[in-house]
Image (spheres, helix red, strand yellow):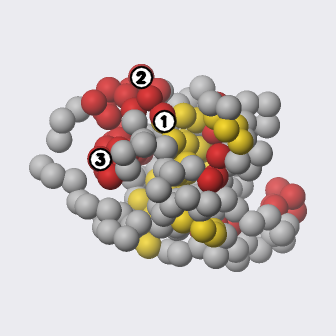
Amino acid sequence: MTTPNINNGWLPQAQHRESPHADERPDANDISVLVVHGISLPAGEFGGPYIDDLFMGTLDTSAHPDFAVLEGLRVSAHCLIRRDGELIQYVPFHRRAWHAGRSHYCGRRRCNDFTIGIELEGTDHQPYTNEQYQRLAEVARQLIEHYPGLTRRRIVGHEHIAPVRKTDPGPAFDWQRFHQLLSKKV
C-alpha cells in the first residue's frame, strides 16, 4: 500500500480546516523536526468542539471556567489526531503553525520556524489510543518521505523542546510503541 502524497502542504486523508493562527516560515524548505503534543479542552475531557475552536480562533472563553486563561491566545497546530484517529489539518506544512511557543532544539530557538506540530487529543497521564498511534505513524511516514530534513530521529515531544514549560505528550505516550509502528512497512 502506498501512502497518499502531500499536496501543496496538505494531507489528502485529513479533514482541512485552515486556521488563521499561522504565518510564513522564514525558510519554507527548512522543515526538519516533528513535534508531538497532547491536548484536551477542558483538561481531561475528550470529543468536544473546544480544541477546534481554539485553533480556529473562535473559542468562547466563557464556556468553561478553565478557559479564562486562554482569552486572547493565538495558537494552532498543523494537525490534530482525535481519540478515534480522526485527522484534522489546520495549517499546510510549508506554513508556520503556532504550536511550540518559547522552545529550543539542538541549539536552535524559535522551533515553530522549522517544525511540524501534531496534537494528540489526550493528557499526560491517560494512555493514548491505538487509533492515534496508528494515525500518527502513518502521518509521520508521509512527512519523512516528503521532507528530506525530517528523520525518525528528529521526532520529539513538546516536553523535549520546552522542558521547563511543557510536559506533553507526557509519560502516557509510549515512544517505543510509536517507533515500532513507524518502522513497519505498509
- Report x, y in % for residue 4: 23, 60
At label 1, which amino acid type do we have?
Answer: Ile
Q: Secondary structure at mark 1?
A: strand
The C terminus: image quadrant: top left
Give the image location of residue 35, x and y in percent: 55, 43
Looking at the image, residue 82 sits to the left or right of residue 72; the answer is left
Badge 1: few (under 14), some or many (20 or more) residues near its Cα, within 10 Å?
many
- The answer to whether residue 65 is visible is no
Amino acid type, mark 2: Gln
At horizontal 57% and vertical 50% (from top left) the residue drawn is: 114
Q: Which corner quadrant of the image does residue 23 belong to?
A: bottom right
Ranked by sequence position, the earlier of labels 3 and 1 is 3
> Does 157 sit above or below residue 90?
above
Look at mark 2 in the image and give the residue it sits on: 176
Helix, strand or loop at label 3? It is: helix
Name which residue type carries label 3: Glu
Does 60 sit above or below residue 183? below
Query: In the structure shown, which secondary structural element does the residue marked by tag 2 occupy?
Result: helix
Q: CA distance from mark 3 to mark 1?
A: 14 Å
Label 2: few (<14), some or many (≥20) within 10 Å?
few
In the drawing, what numbered circle is on residue 155?
1
For label 3, the crowd category at 10 Å Cα-Cα, with few meaning under 14, some 14 to 19 and many 20 or more, is some
Q: CA distance from mark 2 to mark 1?
A: 12 Å
